[in-house]
Image (tube, rainbow, N blue to C red):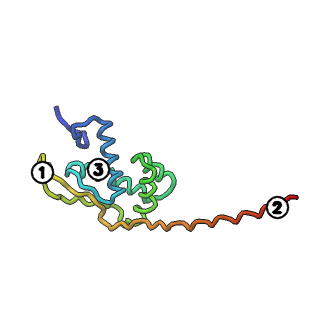
Amino acid sequence: MHRHGYKGRKFGRETDQRTALTRGLMRSLFKNKSISTTLAKAKEIRRPAEKLITIAKKGDLASRRLVIARINDQLIGNELVDVIAPQLKRNSGYLRIERTGFRRGDNAEMATISFVDEIKEAKSEPKAKAEPKAKPAKKETK
């Protein structure tokens, strides 16, 4: 039996579990800007994550909806489109994988996946609270 035409690693999981794992790792990556995981998982999420970033760089409504649908998180999807993607000035190669050694328990090779460019956090200035309007004086009735 040959293995031609099969892409991706299986990680000993079924398809739905593998999809959930990939989405969860991408959500963590976009939220924290850098994650530490096994080398195989880092290599596996790099390609779909970079494709999502390329989609997010368009910035239109359809792209926003595609990103949110693929990672199943509206807040992180909006952050990717509004904050992260505009800061990336390159056309591809947004992510870097650095080997960090071996895990102590099972000797699995570990890696850190992070953005090549520095991502600055969005500065959300606290909105000025509107002062409560003065209550109108009650009319005295006699």
Vertical relation: 99 (above or below) 4: below
Quadrant of the snapshot with the C terminus: bottom right
**Within 10 Å of the Cα at label 2, are there few (<14), some (14-19), or many (20+) other Cα atoms?**
few
**Within 10 Å of the Cα at label 1, are there few (<14), some (14-19), or many (20+) other Cα atoms?**
few
Q: Is residue 127 left or right of residue 54?
A: right
Dot label at residue 139: 2
**Within 10 Å of the Cα at label 3, are there few (<14), some (14-19), or many (20+) other Cα atoms?**
some
Q: CA distance from mark 1 to mark 2?
A: 78 Å
The secondary structure type at the circle numbered 2 is: loop
Q: Residue at x 40, y 62 (%)?
A: 84
- Cβ atoms under marks 2 and 3 closer than 8 Å: no
For disc 1, the marked residue is: 104
At label 3, the amino acid type is Ile
Quarter of the image for residue 21 reads: top left
Q: CA distance from mark 2 to mark 3?
A: 69 Å
Q: CA distance from mark 3 to mark 1?
A: 23 Å
For disc 3, the marked residue is: 45
Q: Residue at x 46, y 55 (%)?
A: 78
Q: Residue at x 39, y 48 (%)?
A: 71
